[in-house]
Amino acid sequence: MVETDILIIGAGPTGLFTVFEAGLLKMKCHLIDALPQAGGQCSEIYPKKPIYDIPAYPEILAGELTEKLLEQCKQFEPGFTLGERAETIEKQTDGSFIVTTNKGTQHKAPVVAIAGGLGSFEPRKPQLDTIEYYEDRGIAYIIKDPEVYRDKKVVISGGGDSALDWSIFLSEVASEVTLIHRRNEFRGALDSVDKVQELKNKGKINIITPAEVTALFGEHQLESIEVTKSGKTPVRIKTDYFIPLFGLSPKLGPIADWGLEIEKNAIKVNNALDYQTNIPGIFAIGDVNTYPGKLKLILCGFHEASLMCQAAYQIINPGKRYVLKYTTVSGIDGFDGTRKEAPKAVVKSIR
C-alpha cells in the first residue's frame, strides 16, 4: 500500500504545482493519473499548443509547461501511479482515506486532493454522415504535432480559444488555413480575436462566417468539404485536413460515485475558505471544481492549490502553527536536506 500525506488525483498542471506547494510545507505527495504520463491534457492532447496566460511566459507550449512543472516539483520527490484510474475511496476510522485504482493499487492518505481537470473526456463531434470513416484519414479532433500540417491545406471549425489559437499557430505552418464558425462572433480571448483579424487582413487566414461544414468528400482520404452559409448555396472547399474544435465532453467517471456534491459535472467546493468538498479531508482544485465566479484557467488552479495546501497542513498537523514565509526570504529546503536560496470569455466579431 502506498502511504503519503496528500494523495493527488490527477497529474496535470494543477496537480503538479500542488506537489511544489505541499513540499514547501514539508508534506509528501503521491499522484494518480489514468494517463501513462504526467501532464494531463497538456501532454496527452495538445503538447504543442501555445499557452499565453502563464505568468512570466508570454508564450509557452503546453508540453514545455509540463516539463517545467515536473522540474519544479522534482526536488520534493513525489510518487506516481500512472496508467491507473482512481476507482473507489473509503474513509478509515482514523480519518484517513484509502483510494483503490482500477488495477487494485491501494493508496492511503489523510488528505485527498482531486485535481482531475475535466475528468475523462471525449471530443464533441459535428453531426456529419461518414465522419467516422474519415477519422485518421484527414479528420482530427486534437492537434498533437503541428508538423503533420506542414505545407497542407487545413480547415478548422469552432469559435472558442482552441480554434482561434490553432488558426493563429498553423498560419505559420500550413499552406492554407480556413476558419469556419457558425456565428459571426467568436467567444475566445480578445487578443486572439484581434490576431486572427490581423492575419485575415494579411491574407494568411480565410474566415467563413456564419457557416457550417455540412458534408465530407474523398474516396480513401478526405479531399474536400462542403460549407453552407445561411441562405446561400453550399460550396466545396479542397482540403487535406478538417479539424473540428468544439471542445470536450467531460465525465467525472468513478469520482461521481464518491458521495461528493456535484453540479453540472463539476465538484462543488467551499471557495470562501480552502476548496474543500462536502466531505472533510477531500479537496477539489482546478477545472474539476465549481463555485460562484469560477474561471477554468490554469493559473486559477495554481492559486487554489496554494490555499488547499495551507488547509491540508492543519489536517495533517493538528494544532501546529505554521507561519507563512516567502520563498524569496526562506529559500527552498529540499527533502534531501539541501537548501536552495531563492534569487533576489469575451465576445467579439471578425469582419
Image (spheres, helix red, strand yellow):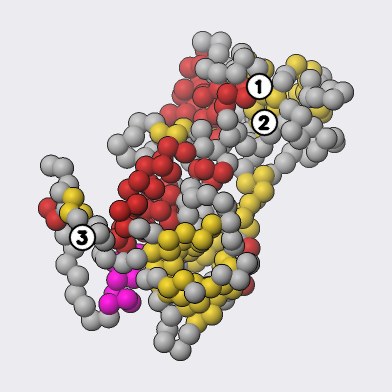
Q: Which residue lies furthest to the bottom in this view?
A: 93
Residues drawn in magenta: 308-317
Q: In which quarter of the image is the C terminus?
A: top right
Instruction: Name the secondary structure under disc 2.
Output: strand
Q: Is the magenta region chiefly helix, strand or loop?
A: helix
- Which residue is found at the position 47% from the left and 29% from the top? 192
Counting from the top left corner in percent of width and height, residue 11 is at: 48, 54
Labelled pair 1, 2 in contact (Cβ < 8 Å) = yes
Residue 218 falls left or right of residue 14: right
Query: Which one is earlier in the sequence, the residue at label 1 or at label 2?
Result: 1
The answer to whether residue 48 is visible is yes
Counting from the top left corner in percent of width and height, residue 134 is at: 79, 32
Disc 3 target residue: 337
Q: Is residue 19 magenta?
A: no
The answer to whether residue 256 is visible is no
Disc 1 target residue: 154
Decide: few, some or many residues near mark 2? Use Cα within 10 Å; few <14, some 14-19, many ≥20: some
- Which residue is found at the position 51% from the left and 33% from the top? 48
Residue 68 falls left or right of residue 199: left
Q: How far apart are marks 1 and 2 (CA)?
A: 8 Å
Disc 2 target residue: 243
Q: Is residue 309 magenta?
A: yes
- Which residue is found at the position 32% from the left and 40% from the top? 55
